[in-house]
Image (spheres, rainbow, N blue to C red):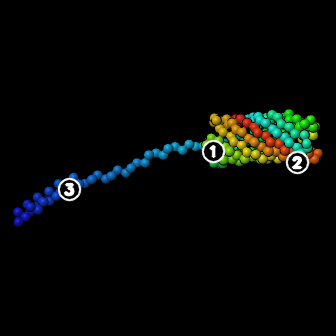
Amino acid sequence: MLKHTLTAAAALLAANTAFAGNVTAPAEEPTLAPAAPVAASPNWTGFYLGGQIGYADVDTNLAGVDGDDVIGGIVAGYDYDLGNWVVGAGLDYDFADIDLGGAASVENVFRVKLRGGYKIGNGLLYATGGYANADTDTLSDDDGYFIGAGYEHLIANQFSLGGEILYHEFDNFNSTGIDVEATTIQLRGTFRF
């Protein structure tokens, strides 16, 4: 019996030694690398003030009463950033001296505008529209509307450059029976607060 007990003990000892190398350490859980920071698009919320300059083409329903020339002025407004979208309201006042074939000269254009657009990186692609008032030297002034589109790009935290094209319409200008259409293309720079 002693022989069986010694054999069993030797077998148990051999088995323990054989299994000692088989025990594997638990696998380490992989660590996730931190995600690359997502570049946040700039926040457009706030007031802006700036200037614009460009070209205006004015046509009427009278033969020979049309003209084109330089136009430019000041812009001011407020934008509100909604995430990917931006909405805003603004005022434009442009000075001009557009001769309409000797019949009149457009001297200035005032606009009250609404705009809404989609952010593309540091830029804003937008549509705009609203109220317009055009003043002439002989026909006084009249109210109309405008629609258009533009793109503005932040080149610094508080400064943007952009361009805008607008179509204006003034039906029966100052009750004269003259219908006026104007297209403006302008470059603009704004300081943002």
Q: Visible in this render: residue 191? A: yes
In the foreground, 61 or 176: 61
What secondary structure is found at the residue carrying circle 2? loop
Lower position in the chain sequence, tag 2 or tag 3: 3
Label 1 CA crowd tier, 10 Å (few <14, some 14–19, many 20+): some
Q: Which residue is mark 2?
A: 171
Compared with 2, 48 (above or below) is above
Left/right of residue 25 with respect to residue 154 in the rendered view: left
Picture quadrant of residue 166: top right
Point out the frontmost of discs 3 and 1: 1
Q: Which residue is mark 3?
A: 19
Q: CA distance from mark 2 to mark 1?
A: 36 Å
Q: CA distance from mark 2 to mark 3?
A: 98 Å
Picture quadrant of residue 89: top right
Q: Amino acid at mark 2?
A: Asp
Q: Which residue is mark 1?
A: 120
Label 3 CA crowd tier, 10 Å (few <14, some 14–19, many 20+): few
Quadrant where the C terminus is found in the figure: top right
In percent of width and height, residue 191 lies at 70, 35
Lower position in the chain sequence, tag 3 or tag 1: 3
What secondary structure is found at the residue carrying circle 1? strand
In the foreground, 2 or 27: 27
